[in-house]
Image: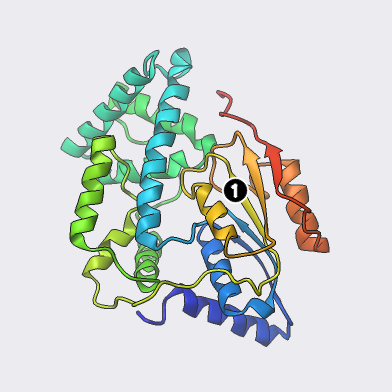
Amino acid sequence: MPYLSTDQTARDMDAIRAALGERETNFLGVSYGTYLGAAYAARFPHRTGRMVLDGVVGPWNWYDFDVIQSRALLRRRDTFFTWTAEHPARFGLGGGAPAVRHAYVRVREGLADRPVNGFGAAEFDRAVYRALGRTERWAGLADGLRTYLRDGSTEGLRPAADFDSPASRNYEAANRMIKCADGPASTPRKTVADIRHTRRLDPQPVLTGMEASTCAYWHHRPARRTPLGSPEAPPLLLVASAHDPVTPIEGARQLRRFLPGSRLVTLDNDYSHGVFASRGNACVDDTAAAYLVDGAVPTEDVRCLGPGLPAVP
C-alpha cells in the first residue's frame, strides 16, 4: 500500500519523462488527474512543463474533499429536481420540485425494499452520482425515475457502462487505496458526525463519493498529506465549471494559491464535471489549446459563457 499513493505515481510519471528523453512533462489532467498533476508540480517543479488541470480537486485532504463534494451534490440534485419540474409534460414527475423529489424518494425507497435484478439502493445512488456530474445525463435519469414508477423497470437507471464489472470494482478499490495512502485519515467519530450533519441538511444524501471515510480502518496511515503545487513551478492553467458538483470550483481557487502565476479559466453558467474538449465551448478550448500548443498563458483569469441548464430532448 505505501507504493500506491499519488506521490509514488508522480515519481512514475517522472520516470516516463526520463525514459522518453524529455526535459519536461507536459500534462492534461482531469478530475483526479488534477491532483496528480499538482503533486507532480510539487515534487518536480523544475521538470513541470505546460499543464492543464481541468475539474480541479482542491488542496484538502481526501476526506474533507469528500464531505465538500457530498454537500455540493445535494445542491446540484435540487437543481435537477427544479429543472425536471419545469418540464412536467416531458418527464411526468410532477409540476414542482417537491413533487419530483417525492418521486425520487419513492424510487429509492422502493429499490431499498426490493432490489430489481441486483439493482438496489446502493446501485441507485451510484447512478445518481454519475448522472449529476454531467447535465447531458439528467434527462436519462428523469426518464429512468418515471419508467421505474410506471412499470418497475430499472433499465433506464442502469448506466451504459457496467459499473459492477470486475474492472470497475478494481478501479474503486484502487481509488480508495490511493486516497488512504495520500494523507491522514478521519476518525470514525468525525465521520459519523459529518454524515449525521449531512443528513440534517437532507435526509436523502448522496454519499457514494465518501470513499475516504473507510481510511479510518486501514492500518497504513501516513503522517502527512501529499504536497500539492509549488512556487517554483511555472504557471499552470486551471479549468473549472462554475457549478460542478463533483469538483466544486472552490477547489480550483484554493489550489491556485499554491501555484503562483497560474490562471483560472471558468465556464460560467455550467453544471458539469470536466470542461476542456468535452463541453464544446470554443472560449475554453481555444484558451487551453493556445496554452498547450504555444505556451500562451493568459494575462489574467478567463471567464467563458456556458450553456446553462440542458435543453429538453
Quadrant, the N terminus: bottom left
**Foreground residue among 100 and 229:** 229
In the image: residue 9, left or right of residue 187:
right
Q: Can residue 62 be seen in this view?
A: yes
At 37% across and 71% down in the image, what residue appears?
183
The x, y position of residue 19, in whole percent, is 66, 87
* Amino acid type, residue under disc 1 in the picture: Ala
Element under disc 1: strand
| Image-quadrant location for residue 215 | bottom left
The x, y position of residue 30, in whole percent, is 57, 57
The x, y position of residue 47, in whole percent, is 68, 79
The x, y position of residue 212, in whole percent, is 32, 61
In the image: residue 96, left or right of residue 117:
right
At 53% across and 39% down in the image, what residue appears?
243
Q: Name the residue under label 1.
A: 240
Q: Is residue 157 visible?
A: no
Q: Mark 1 Cα within 10 Å, few/some/many (few <14, many 20+)?
A: many
| Image-quadrant location for residue 182 | bottom left
